[in-house]
Image (cartoon, helix red, strand yellow):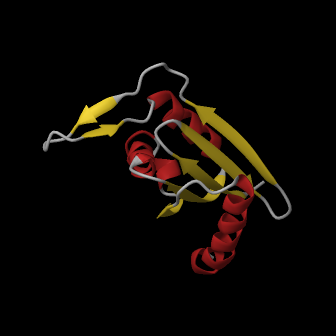
Amino acid sequence: MSFHACVWIDHHEAKVFGLTKGTSVETHFADHSQHLHKKADRSGHTAHEVDHAILDAVATALHGAEGILITGPGQAKSVLAGWLIEHHPAIAKKVWDIKPADHPTDAELVAEARAYFRAADRMHA
């Protein structure tokens, strides 16, 4: 069965919504570690890292997706996209877009993803 997937991700958690015509199924992944992973860039600023276990779990949940939309606040969405390119290139080819989003409700996110995929399906047909 083909489906679209919307991923909302930040440095603490990820939600994957599998979307078919009439249904949506959410899978939730969270970093339960007691410490935050930080990485310094060349300027000395630190950015939170996303747990690699979460990135791999998200990749597993995306298997079989026809099209993928990645969204969320901050840098985590770009980290996920890079992880997919490096570790799961077949899935990375299914990423149609990466969009910023704050913290919408699950219902808002699903509605926005459905609207996005209705329009994007015409371009990817």
Q: Is residue 76 above or below residue 67?
A: above
Q: Say left or right for 19 vs 40.
A: right
Q: Is residue 37 above or below residue 86?
A: above
Question: Residue drawn at (37%, 28%), measured in percent from left and top?
Answer: 37
Q: Is residue 38 above or below residue 21?
A: above
Looking at this view, is 120 or 112 the one in front?
112
Q: Say left or right for 33 vs 2.
A: left
Percent x, y of residue 116: 63, 72
Tell me where residue 50 sits by quadrant: top left
Question: Residue drawn at (21%, 41%), measured in percent from left and top?
Answer: 45
Q: Is residue 83 above or below residue 19?
A: above
- Quarter the C terminus occupies: bottom right
Q: Say left or right for 59 vs 81.
A: right
Percent x, y of residue 19: 74, 57
Of all residues, the one furthest to the right in this rendering is: 22
Percent x, y of residue 52: 45, 30
**Residue 69 visible in the picture:** yes
Question: Residue drawn at (68%, 73%), measured in percent from left and top?
Answer: 115
Looking at this view, is 27 or 44 the one in front?
44
Question: Residue drawn at (48%, 19%), measured in percent from left and top?
Answer: 34
